[in-house]
Image (cartoon, rainbow, N blue to C red):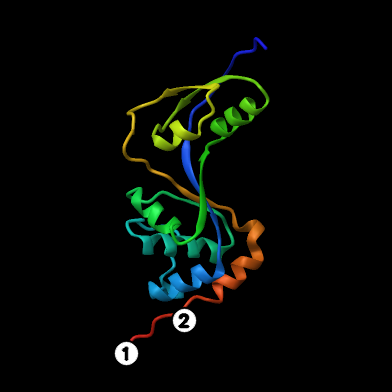
Amino acid sequence: MKERIALGFHTCVDYELEWSTQVVEAQIKALNIHADELKMDMAVDSERAIWLVSLAHLQAGIGCEIIPDISELCVDFANHFEYEVTLGGTPTRAAIVLDRLGYPSMLQTSCYNKHVERLMPASVRVLPGGVLIIVGYFPMLCYNVQEECEFRQMILTLLLPEKTEY
């Protein structure tokens, strides 16, 4: 094979979570989350904020992409679940598929860290874009709830009622 394939950029670290109703219920209670607090558009500066934004999107029946202020929040959130760290971004996923088909490729990435280094196939030549991030990483939490309607309904019934003022 003498084909040469160059791809675009956008590599991200994905945490693919195995959602658990029990975990979600425990966190709603532990963090004292109430239905009237849910917001889709807010600063994601805490694990509680991740839950508020996630549950707001679940309530609306739409998927979301959440980018917390600091990467450790993703790890804290993910540690409640069974999960797998994977690489995302359409060009990156395409490069991985091309590798499986026996084609090498070249990919300029928007992110480069220990996960990219570990998970990118050897046949993919990586040209890091911007600043190399070797120590830190900024993963995103992404999910699509369209396929999870039954799960969504179960989760929404677990929300604590709205706060009442005394």
Label 2 – label 1 distance at C-alpha: 15 Å
- Which of the two labelled residues, at mark 2 and mark 1, occupies the earlier sequence position? 2
Q: Residue at x 63, y 26 (%)?
A: 98
Would you place residue 82 above or below residue 161 in this image? Answer: above
Q: Nearer the viewer, residue 122 or 2?
A: 122
The residue closer to the viewer here, 55 or 128, is 128
98 w.r.t. 85: above or below:
above
User: At 55% across and 72% down in the image, what residue appears?
Assistant: 156
The kind of secondary structure element at disc 1 is: loop
Crowding at label 2, few (<14), some or many (≥20) Cα neighbours within 10 Å?
few
Q: Looking at the picture, how far across and down is residue 57, in whole percent? A: 52, 61
Q: Position of residue 73 (x, y in %)?
A: 36, 54
Kind of residue at disc 1 = Tyr
Check the image and name the residue furthest to the bottom. 166
Q: Which mark is residue 135?
A: none
Image spot of residue 131 (x, y percent): 32, 28
Q: Which residue is mark 1?
A: 166
Give the class, few, some or many, for how many residues have Cα within 10 Å of label 1's Cα (few <14, many ≥20): few
Q: Give the residue type at disc 2.
A: Pro
The residue labelled by disc 2 is 161
Is label 2 in contact with label 1 (beta carbons under 8 Å)? no
Residue that sits furthest to the top in the current view: 2
Say which residue appears at 41% left-offset and 73% top-offset.
Answer: 33
User: Which quadrant holds the N terminus?
Assistant: top right
Element under disc 2 = loop
Q: Quadrant of the C terminus?
A: bottom left
In the image, 99: left or right of 128? Answer: right
Where residue 61 appears, as percent x and y from the top left, is: 59, 62
Q: Nearer the viewer, mark 2 or mark 1?
A: 2
Q: Residue at x 38, y 43 (%)?
A: 138
